[in-house]
Amino acid sequence: MAAATHVIATQGLSAPTATIAQEAGVSNGSLFTYFATKGDMFNQLFLELKADMATAALEGLPAGAELRKRTFHAWRNWMRWAVSNPEKRRALAQLYLSEEITSSAPSAGRKQPAEKVAELVDLMEQCRSIGPMQNTPLGFVAAIMNAMAEATMDFMVHDPPNADRHCRAGFEAFWRVVGG
């Protein structure tokens, strides 16, 4: 998965599986021992990267705190994860755009990472339910949130001395749009 992350981040989704196998130090045929297709590998990587991001976002979440405080905590952790893991961020962004990603991605014998992702989605649903977008489909709200997050991450990466300020400004914009 680390090899696939690196290759996708640097060469894109059209990179041959042989390149991923070479990066992983295995034969191309061995790669398909674990994944039936390139799409299956992409789906598993997508799930793993989402779970990694969600786990980081929820780390230390103050359970009893008000919704805004919990949401900012998750946002800040998400931004830190993205800035600290640029290859994972780039690979995940590319996978989001892939038509090969399905909602029922195979687990290839690995534990599904759905629990942490579901917890993060629940937090977003709580925000949406109290704000001006409460009647907007959650997928649309998620797309807006991702766009705001990507812009925030870009500013944090390109202006490290002001990263915390950009993180807070991005959150404030998100909260006004979604949380009210």
Image (cartoon, rainbow, N blue to C red):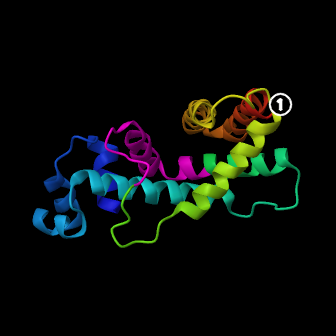
Who's the residue at 44% across and 49% down the image?
Answer: 103
Q: Position of residue 109 (x, y in %)?
A: 35, 73
| Residue found at x 56% / y 32% | 143
**Closer-to-camera residue (140/176):** 140
Q: Residues within 10 Å of mark 1 (few under 14, many from 20)?
A: some
Point out the image quarter for the C terminus.
top right
What's the residue at 38%, 40% (across, down)? Answer: 94
Q: Establish if 153 lies above or below 136.
A: below
Any magenta on residue 108?
A: no
Above/below status of 88 relative to 141? below
100 drawn magenta: yes
SS at badge 1 = loop
Quadrant where the N terminus sits is bottom left
Query: Would residue 131 appear left or right of 32 to someone viewing this image?
Result: right
The amino acid pointed to by label 1 is Gly
Residue annotated with mark 1: 180
Q: How many marks?
A: 1
Q: Which residues are magenta?
A: 80-104
Q: Is residue 83 left or right of residue 126?
A: left
Query: Residue 36: percent from the left, percent from the top?
Result: 21, 61
Q: Is residue 76 visible?
A: no
Q: Is residue 112 visible?
A: yes
